Image (cartoon, rainbow, N blue to C red):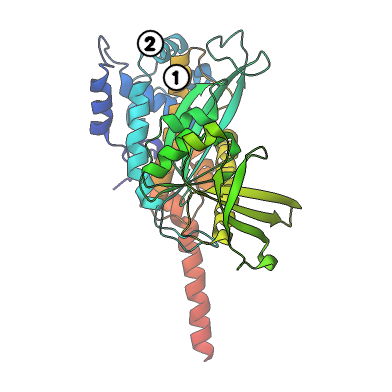
Amino acid sequence: MNSGKYVFAQLLQFLDRYEFDKCVSRYNGDFRTRDFNCWNQFIQLFFGQLTSRNSLRDICVCLKAHKNKLYHLGIRTYVNQSTLSRANEGRDYRIFADFGAYLIGKVRPLYGKGAIAGVAIGNEVLLLDSTTISLSLKLFGWAPGKYSRGAVKIHTLLDLRGSIPAFILITDGKYHDSNTLDILVPTPETIYVMDKAYVDFAALFNINNCGAYFITRAKTSMDFSVIESNFNIDARSGLLTDRTVELNGYKSKKLYPEPLRLVEYYNADKEVELVFLTNNFEVSALEIARLYRHRWQIEVFFKWIKQNLVIKSLWGQSENAVNIHIWIAICTYLIVALVKHTLKSTLSIYEIMQILGISAFDKTPLNDLLTENQKNQNVKEQEIWNLFDAKT
């Protein structure tokens, strides 16, 4: 089926061009364009992410060097750096953001059936946090950060099952994390896990009213009264207390008038006491502690994308260009995750990225490239069983 096709061209077959064109039409992205349309812009930037090019110049130089192969790669024509830069500056980033949202909706359900270690619940569990990319304020004047520096924040809602983003928001560095809760639309029965930076009682009460749950860290200054205590806890598990409380502060009580659950847990590994605040009275106190411990999965995700995608060195300076750059990076992650699931590859997303990064101009079928080790392992296992059967 894919005999003689370049690996990069095979990857493009996993993309729905019709859905992409719908995003382009929504914002009239191809108005007054000839050869270099939004689709060509997307696949050239996708090529740059996949092969870890550090600049637009690197992308253009590599494609120009292989100009005789571009048609077979799926790229209509190569352009120079200035043309690609102008496209990033002028074309609406929402085209690529909407296509990224489409990919999220397609890929996330594929990984949503896994189990969560140490927790026996069927609820969706979403982790909320942000990561910061430091910038030069002189070059990125639209993105102020802390301490007279520039910065961009990537606010992410990550599905704990499969580590696939459910929501992405890109802002400047001064945008407070808790403001993200004002944009999110909580889904009933979903558990949102976040750190204490997101303690905004008005937003938390909105989550509660939507029939969803939250788990966060309580601030040390929180004023509360204990309504009820659960003494049936096992101290050997690390649990210290499990109490039902109500807020005392005039403003806090007005913003969140209903009871809350306060769970204290001792982390023996780090020798620290943690206090969790939640509106979920159904799961056990130990499961609340374990769910919060899984919050570090989003830190692993941020570390992964910064190490394996071109995120820290941006390909443009305007707000629009930066948004396009980051959304192309997220799309690359989602496309690789889609390929992994479709081919049922046992390789990790990291391993697939490394293989695809050096195989873009190879003509090996993707199925052979990404499942060969799996096939060899199955052959070896079969040979072992054959030997065992022969002896018995």
How packed mark 2 is, by other alpha carbons closer than 10 Å (few <14, some 14-19, many 20 or more), is: few
Q: Amino acid at mark 1?
A: Lys
**Up-down: is 128 above or below 345?**
above
Q: Is residue 49 left or right of residue 75?
A: right
Name the residue: 61% across, 7% down. 138
Residue 26 can be seen, yes or no: yes
Disc 1 and disc 2 in contact, CB within 8 angstroms? no
Give residue 87's position: percent from left, percent from top. Answer: 39, 13
**x, y percent for residue 230:** 58, 63
SS type, badge 2: helix
Q: Is residue 81 left or right of residue 90?
A: right
Height in image: 361 above or below 123? above
Check residue 343 in the rendering and tell me which mark sits there, or answer none.
none
Q: Residue at x 37, y 27 (%)?
A: 97
Q: Nearer the viewer, residue 214 or 50?
A: 214
Q: Which residue is outermost to the bottom? A: 392
Q: Secondary structure at mark 1?
A: helix
**Above or below for 83 versus 253:** above
Residue 45 point in image, percent of width and height: 43, 25
The residue under the point 27% across, 16% down is 30
Badge 1: residue crowd in 10 Å (few <14, some 14–19, many ≥20): some
**Residue 364 can be seen in this image:** no
- Give the residue pinned by disc 2: 90
Q: What is the distance, in whole Å, between disc 1 and disc 2 at their CAs?
A: 23 Å
Q: Give the amino acid at mark 2.
A: Gly
Q: Earlier in the sequence, mark 1 or mark 2?
A: 1
Q: Residue at point 54% right, 30% down?
A: 177
Please give the residue where the numbered disc 1 appears in the rendered image. Answer: 64
Q: Quadrant of residue 338?
A: top left
